[in-house]
Amino acid sequence: GAVVSQHPSRVICKSGTSVKIECRSLDFQATTMFWYRQFPKKSLMLMATSNEGSKATYEQGVEKDKFLINHASLTLSTLTVTSAHPEDSSFYICSAPAPLTSHAADTQYFGPGTRLTVL
Amino acid sequence: ELKVEQNPLFLSMQEGKNYTIYCNYSTTSDRLYWYRQDPGKSLESLFVLLSNGAVKQEGRLMASLDTKARLSTLHITAAVHDLSATYFCAVDTYMDSNYQLIWGAGTKLIIKP
């Protein structure tokens, strides 16, 4: 069945470095992907909507220069955390709408998440 | 302001008991989702409710939707330990030319043997 993968699943980096997280849709194409962030013991927070071939749409309060999103193909969106700081440490999850032609056309497929720790 | 409110946020219960988690939302929507999240894991889709009066059941979980009241419930029957997890509801809404999910805060459910 359709699956969304993320890479890496876990990353530890030094403060000031940049980290790229990949979100791939497997076996289906996704013109839109969503990036979420989860703070400890909190619900997911939508960060941005990634649109294939155009600029991402960022939620209010999310710095677009800090969290760079590139949706270069119909199966890949990337989130780059630039000049990461310890407060960027979090669990990042992407999702993609299930294909309209699939049996699960009304749901979202979630990636397994990426745990980012900035030292 | 678009809001999705879950109640309760934390629930500790004994095995074998019944309980209900509530999800109220403020926006107009006819698609509501329930997800389960185990610690450190991504979300697992449980139910998609698409219309007023929709009721879906899977094992000991049953979800319902009342779009007029903007309320969904997730009912747990004869709870077992394996159902311990955090449960999220989310509502589809169309804004700024995009469909987005608005999430509830989650209900952490602990079921004690």
Image (tube, coloured by chain):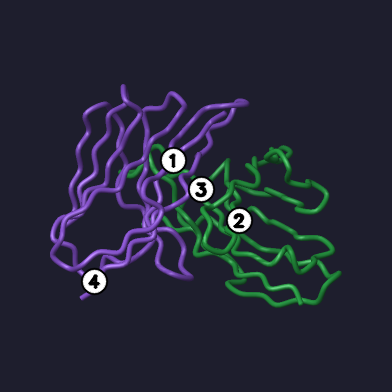
In the depicted structure, whether residue A91 falls above or below residue B68? below
Q: From the image, tell me which residue sits under label 3.
A: A96
Q: Which mark is residue B81?
A: 4
Closer to the chain start, of discs 4 and 1, is 1
Q: Tag 2, which chain?
A: A
In the depicted structure, whether residue A102 falls above or below residue B106? above
- At label 2, the amino acid type is Arg
Q: Quadrant of residue B18?
A: bottom left
Label 1, label 3: how many angstroms apart (C-alpha)? 24 Å
The chain coloured purple in the image: B
* Camera-nearest label, 4 or 2: 4
Label 3, label 2: how many angstroms apart (C-alpha)? 15 Å
Q: In the drawing, does residue B28 fall left or right of residue B58? A: right
Label 4, label 1: how many angstroms apart (C-alpha)? 25 Å
Per the image, label 2 sits on a secondary structure element best described as: strand
Q: Where is residue A100 in the image (x, y as percent from the top left)?
A: 40, 37
Closer to the chain start, of discs 3 and 2, is 2
Q: Position of residue B79 (x, y in %)?
A: 18, 63
- At label 1, the amino acid type is Glu
